[in-house]
Amino acid sequence: MKNTSDFKTQDLVAEAAAWRLASLLLERPRPEWKSEILQLCSEVTDGKLSSCARRADQGTEEIYHRLFGPGGTVSPREVSYCGFEDPGRLMAELASFYQAFSFQPRREEPIDHISVEAGFVGYLFLKEAYAQMREDSESVGITKKARERFTDEHIGRCARGMIHRLGDIPPYLGDVLSWLADPPQPL
């Protein structure tokens, strides 16, 4: 018989998969991109995010670069939405978050790119699940607090900024950004 801790751990792993899927949907489409999305989609229980994944066949590298590339419609980088805040301080804060949790993403984008940031939140869910499995309540608390702070202060700001600047985009992108701007709260 499974105890409550086992169910909590499973929920955290499911959240990690959802955030990884969101991250993947915001990456530049590459040859294996669509198959990775479909494989990961089977792990995700969030209906809105699964719907985004099923519509990702609308995504192409051309559309990605038209929207997010240099001179594109909108920047996928958080530094673009920090107002008068010092961009160097923002980048240093992100680097500190990543270093504190040993996050070393496989990426081609800068550390403030929304796909990298969403991947970090997914990684934090995995770290929290591991701490939960080990019954390390201190690590659970630290990781959860960092994840919530990062989501509120970084992901939300970037996703909301992008939504306000986007015009005609594939619906899956608008929906995944909407999901990131106001993600469902884990149980």
Image (cartoon, grey):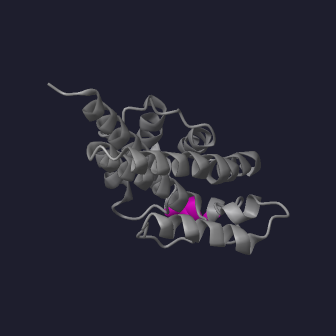
What segment is highlighted magenta in the picture? 61-66
Dividing the picture into quadrants, the one containing residue 1 is top left
Dividing the picture into quadrants, the one containing residue 102 is bottom left
Q: Position of residue 23 (x, y in %)?
A: 48, 54
* In the depicted structure, whether residue 158 falls above or below residue 71: above
* Closest to the observer, 102 or 166: 102
- Is residue 65 magenta-colored? yes
* Closest to the observer, 177 or 122: 122
Say which residue appears at 45% left-offset and 47% top-offset: 19
Q: Position of residue 73 (x, y in %)?
A: 72, 59
Q: Position of residue 124 (x, y in %)?
A: 44, 53
Q: Which secondary structure is most common in the magenta stretch?
A: helix
Can residue 22 be seen here? The reply is no
Can residue 67 be seen here? The reply is yes
* Closest to the observer, 44 or 142: 142
Say which residue appears at 29% left-offset and 39% top-offset: 42
**Residue farthest right in this picture:** 84
